[in-house]
Image (cartoon, coloured by chain):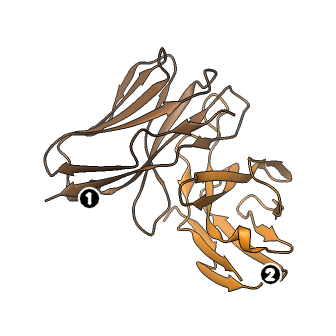
Chain colours: A brown, B orange
Amino acid sequence: GESVGLHLPTLSVQEGDNSIINCAYSNSASDYFIWYKQESGKGPQFIIDIRSNMDKRQGQRVTVLLNKTVKHLSLQIAATQPGDSAVYFCAENWSVGNEKLTFGTGTRLTIIP
Amino acid sequence: EAQVTQNPRYLITVTGKKLTVTCSQNMNHEYMSWYRQDPGLGLRQIYYSMNVEVTDKGDVPEGYKVSRKEKRNFPLILESPSPNQTSLYFCASSFKGARGRPQETQYFGPGTRLLVL
């Protein structure tokens, strides 16, 4: 079946460095993607989204890249800070009118001081 | 303060004893949803609601019921809980997006950790 997955379940990055979290999706019909951050003991928090008519979208210290050719999504976090330590999820949605959101299994990002 | 609240936050129960987890939002959101989160499986959608009296199944609805009698409340009901429903549950809400997608900027509650013995 269709699924959203992540290449790496854990990622450790030195404080101040940039981090890249990857996500592979298998539903070629997906046209809307979201990245969420989940800190320990809390619910997921929206970070950034991107539609399939875009290749790149930037937020504050975060950039999402979408490669539809290989069905790959990535989240780049610039100048990582201790507060960036969390589990990051990608999620996909397809077609207007489809209200379901399919989540990946998550990547745990640990910032090393 | 805009928020999604869930109660209880922690619950231990026994197989077969009916329980309800409440969810309430104060943002006048049309869309509400329930997810369960299990290790290695991420978040999976149980049920969602596009508006009052409108509900639909997500990916894992078996063993759950929901109702949406009021816009702000979306309770999750387990009529006869089983151990495989031990999980971390999240309620979420949002406005409908510009293109009718309710997922945009979805706000999540703090979670309810359920243990079914």
B89 relative to B27, above or below:
below
Q: Quadrant of the C terminus of chain A?
A: bottom left
Read off the chain for label 1: A
Identify the residue at horizontal 74%, vertical 47% (top origin): B59
Residue B32 visible in the picture: no
Residue hosting label 1: A83
Residue B13 point in image, percent of width and height: 72, 85
Disc 1 crowd, CA 10 A, few/some/many (<14, 14-19, 20+)? few
Residue A29 point in image, percent of width and height: 64, 21
Identify the residue at horizontal 21%, vertical 58% (top origin): A82
- Tell me the kind of residue under disc 2: Thr
Viewer-proximal residue, A94 or B103?
A94
Residue hosting label 2: B15
Disc 2 crowd, CA 10 A, few/some/many (<14, 14-19, 20+)? some
Read off the chain for label 2: B
Cα gap from disc 2 to disc 1, whole angstroms = 39 Å
Identify the residue at horizontal 60%, vertical 72% (top origin): B112
Q: Nearer the viewer, mark 2 or mark 1?
A: 2
Viewer-proximal residue, B17 or B55?
B17
